[in-house]
Amino acid sequence: MQCKSILFLTGTRADFGKLKSLIQKTESMKGMEAHLFVTGMHMLAKYGMTAIEVEKSGFKSIYKYINQNNEDSMDIVLSKTIHGLSDYVKELKPDMIVVHGDRVEALAGAIVGALNNILVAHIEGGEVSGTIDELIRHSVSKMAHLHFVSNQSAKSRLLQLGEKSDSIFIIGSPDLDIMKSDTLPDLEEVKQYYEVPFDDYAIVMFHPVTTEVDQLKEHVSSLRQALESTNKNLIIIYPNNDHGSSIIIDELLPLAEQPNVRMFPSIRFESFLTLLKYSRCIIGNSSAGVREAPFYGLPSINIGSRQNGRSAAKSIFNVSTEADEISKAIELAYQSDFEPETEFGIGDSDVMFVSALTSEGFWETSKQKLFVDIS
């Protein structure tokens, strides 16, 4: 087989965590070259300039591109990403572009690939995202030629969208590869690096719901009241950079002055997993609460509508945005124990990914897509 050039697009700390094991495995394979297009939140100082962490991972080919400023709306970010990625792709000439999830950077990658006759592979399509992310994720799936999904439910949704069964590979959620590995940093090492002074703590991650931005200040205010009333030790991590993120940061930032709170723009993915693994629970509306936390058997308080329908794990406490309800759920979570869940795989996604890449006929996948009716 002729050497294949595979371009991975990453725009956030979250999708890099999902892609990292796949990139590592690809780079180690004879006859394959892995390249990274690093953009989005990675390039913003406000969110920790996490492009530095991508570089520290030691990958051979990394290209960095600033696709936004803090004032840009999602459509402008999309257009800028398409412009920069299109120029890069014409120089690199990759055989395949790999995108993840439901961010505008993924949509840009799918558009550039599809319109330039390059295979597009979508990681974790077929999921229920909620809010504007739902529209983006399914749009990316329709632009993609190949799909690497977390479970049978995701595959079934793609079949409903008219995708070919033989273009869909069930590999689980790739971040579980790292969660399961024995290479995560030691807890004391992480606490020392990030100056976390307490042993008993909860993690807080609350993101904007772009379709409910008019109620966002009220929602995050309720969260703040609940956090203050519980008096727990807290590690708070900034939201993603969707519209409304500044409202969340401004509302929660005063908590950072309290001795029981540490607040960070970002935390290195492996360090975050270590902190998550040894926390008492995770509070907010991050996908980490419905995917990563259950894999560790960790309680999560899922607030509001952002993650509706994404997981049926028993360890998830689904609550409204009312402060009293959030407070009660936190207390209940602290008293609960759960067994680990395997709804999204067992931690061998990287092996299954490269197995697909080396399978017979994979690279002959047609770039002409056809809608497959359900018979």
Image (cartoon, rainbow, N blue to C red):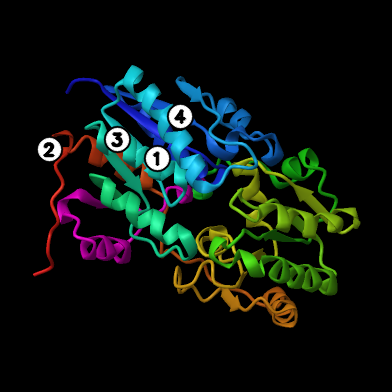
User: Which marked residue is nearer to the observer: mark 3 or mark 2?
Assistant: 3
Labels 1 & 2 near each other (Cβ < 8 A): no
Label 3 sits on residue: 113
Q: Residues within 10 Å of mark 1 (few under 14, many from 20)?
A: many
Estimate the x, y position of residue 4 in percent, counting from the top left: 26, 24
Kindly report which numbered mark, 4 or 1, lies closer to the viewer in this rendering. 1
SS at circle 2 = loop
* Amino acid on which disc 1 is placed: Ala
Residue 39: where, in percent of width, then height? 52, 33
Dot 4 lies on which element? strand
> Of the numbered discs in the image, which one, if any, rests on residue 108?
1
Residue 106, placed above or below residue 278: above
Q: Which residue is mark 2?
A: 361
Q: Position of residue 236 (x, y in %)?
A: 74, 55
Tell me the tag on residue 248. Answer: none
Q: Which residue was labeled with disc 4?
A: 37
Badge 2, how many Cα within 10 Å: few under 14, some, many 20+? Answer: few
State the separation of the CA atoms marked 4 and 1: 12 Å
